[in-house]
Amino acid sequence: MKKLHIYFFAFVAWLLGNERVLGQIGCPEVVRIVVDGCSAEDKQSEYFQFITGTSPFFLNSTLSITTPAGPKNSWKAVPAALLNSMNMMLNISSPCLTGPIFKDPYAAPYNGVIPPGSMVMVFTDQNPVFVNTNLNRFCGDAAVFVISSNTTITPAMFFNNNDCVNNCERTISFNLNGCQSSILYDSRLVVNINGAY
């Protein structure tokens, strides 16, 4: 059983707790979730990351996430300006010498097909914003393919402790090309805006 790393805003912090991922050999694997930690505006910066499995991942195949806020299963390319900004932040913060690594998988030469073993960053809001955090963990990666939701859900997809009083266990479920996984966490254990768990 592998640990799933979850980040919480406003200040980024690791959460390693009772999370679980139910994965299958050769399937895409969720490796990180960034969660709304303090305000409604943060929902634009929520994302999850997964690594494609042993086969190419076709973006017209099944890719969905379901949380208490509802499902999302329609995706699009992020604006080129956002990718450029992310690549600039990467070079300033690291600096990385590998060139632009945040890429649009809908553009040539990929045309909606992500290679096996690739990192994918999926923003869950239709109008994504990337928070300027330390990007050193991306240095040396060949590519990180970035997409965003093509549907609007008003609340944030994930919840902090301020959103709940009773029945606060949250299940986040993923379907990645037929491979299903889920995590379970208690939002009351996110005890402050720094993401302490």
Image (cartoon, rainbow, N blue to C red):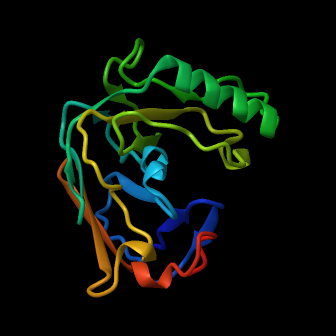
Residue 186, horizontal then vertical, whole percent = 39, 82
Residue that appears at 73% across and 46% down:
136
Q: Would you place residue 54 above or below residue 80 in this image?
A: below
The residue at the point 40 percent across, 32 percent down is: 115
Report which quarter residue 20 is drawn in: bottom left
For the N terminus, the image quarter is bottom left
Q: Quick one: which residue is furthest to the bottom in this view?
A: 166
Q: Position of residue 57 (x, y in %)?
A: 30, 36
From this viewpoint, is residue 155 visible? yes
The image shows residue 31 at horizontal and vertical percentages of 47, 59
For the view shown, which residue lies furthest in the top direction? 108
Name the residue rendered at 36%, 42% in the picture. Answer: 125
- Residue positioned 54% across, 26% down in the render: 82
The foreground one among 20 and 159 is 159
Residue 46: in sight, yes or no? no
Is 20 on the left or on the right of 13, as rendered? left
Q: In which quarter of the image is the C terminus?
A: bottom right
Looking at the image, residue 62 sits to the left or right of residue 162; the answer is left
x and y, in percent, of residue 59 in the image: 27, 32
Q: Relative to residue 158, is residue 93 drawn left or right?
A: right
